[in-house]
Image (tube, rainbow, N blue to C red):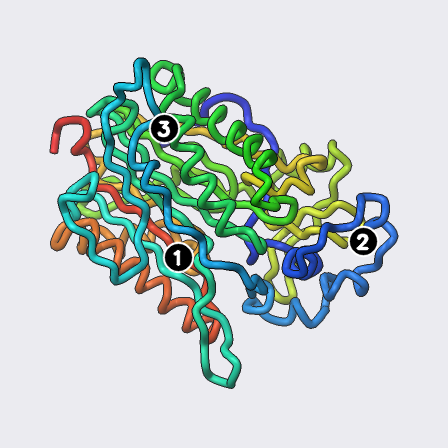
Amino acid sequence: SPRPVGTQRPPAGPPSPHLGARAEALSAQGRRPETHHQADTMSAQDAGGAGKGSVTEQSFRMRRLSVADQEQAEDADPARDKSPSGQGGKRRIRRMSMSPEMGVVRKKADLPFPLEVVGTYSCHGVEPGMRYGETSAKINQDRGAVCYPFADRDDVAMFSVFDGHGVCGDKVSHFAMNTVQAILEDHPDLISKPAHALKHAFVQCDSLLKQEATIDAELSGTTAVVTVLIGATLWVGNAGDSRAVLASRSPSGGYTATALTEDQKPDTPAEMARIKKKKGFVSPPEEEWGGPARVWLDANMTLPGLAMARSIGDHLVTQIGVIAEPEVTEHALRPGDAFFIMASDGVWEFISNEEAVGIVAPILERAGATEACTKLIEKAAAKWREEEGDYRDDISCVIAKLPWLAGEA
């Protein structure tokens, strides 16, 4: 099983689906929230329906509904396809592939890995249309990326998934995707102290985001799960509720699923202790309609209603213990390890780790990683239709076959 690295520290904030109703409304209007003291005086009813039993909490779809009316995130800068300049500016060009929308076919020559070995796609969500029974595409706030070779080494690769939330969620996730990899690739301790490098990259990215004048990250943020494969060892950094899962062959011929990350929920004991120590408030999961535990600035549950304890962005709640520093795990690959899955909660909302491995394994063996990625996303989308009808969260996924990078495949 993966080994936690270093001491655990408090979490950070989530995506639009994870924000309280008032935070979403203010963000959509382009308004800044009241100060901490002003928010304390507001009732749950005044909070735009954030209180228990309000209209906005009557269904799962409404809880997760994006009210963003944003511009489509700009295409990735071509300059990002080059590694940050190394000593003497002679760093070679690496291959970096951003997870494309489902249905987009890219030339094999442009990809970091063969399609059979690494597969990645992103699928935008949908929300209710203008007329009954219609749906419309929502802006995709997820981002994913695969980079290889990494840090000028053929035995290092990086894989990442980001799930943005809030009105500027797509901009935050896009910024984080590019910034985390740039910091990591030039980090002097990436090989010798990977856990330290991962923590520094997340925290430094969050710091740079605060200085980015074009992105308002007070009520917007992103999850981040980043895997760095160094030789035959996986190092996984996680902030939020996106997830990484390892699949290993069992002696009986089947597959077992091992979580490489743990969802950082506000009511997890260590996370909640940190938040409460910083004078934040955590509401328990809502039993009546299945809502998650949330982080609030005040006891009246006014703002922001974040459903995670760690994230990049969500700067309104950094004062109450929501942090960008990731939890990091290490896993030394063993002979039976077959593949890993990284995905946003668009997959994990209705599919367990074990179910995901069961879906992917036979397809991976027969048709390769890209086909397996496609089928997992399609299965997740079908689950959303079955459970939520006219609402579906964004779904992004990376699947990587093992142990090719260790020179054994």
Look at mark 2 in the image and give the residue it sits on. Answer: 300
Q: CA distance from mark 3 to mark 2?
A: 40 Å
Please tell me which of labels 2 and 1 falls first in the chain: 2
Say if mark 2 contacts mark 1, CB within 8 Å.
no
Who's the residue at 46% across and 20% down the image?
196
Res. 233 image quadrant: top left
Closer to viewer: mark 2 or mark 1: 1
| Residue 287 against residue 132 in the figure, above or below | above
Residue 51 locus on image (x, y percent):
75, 62
Q: Amino acid at mark 1?
A: Ile
Residue 387 locus on image (x, y percent):
46, 71
Q: Disc number at residue 235?
A: 3
Q: CA distance from mark 1 to mark 3?
A: 23 Å
Please tell me which of labels 3 and 2 falls first in the chain: 3
Residue 213 locus on image (x, y percent):
59, 40
Look at mark 1 in the image and give the residue it sits on. Answer: 395
Closer to viewer: mark 1 or mark 3: 1
**SS of the residue under disc 1:** strand
Q: Amino acid at mark 2?
A: Asn
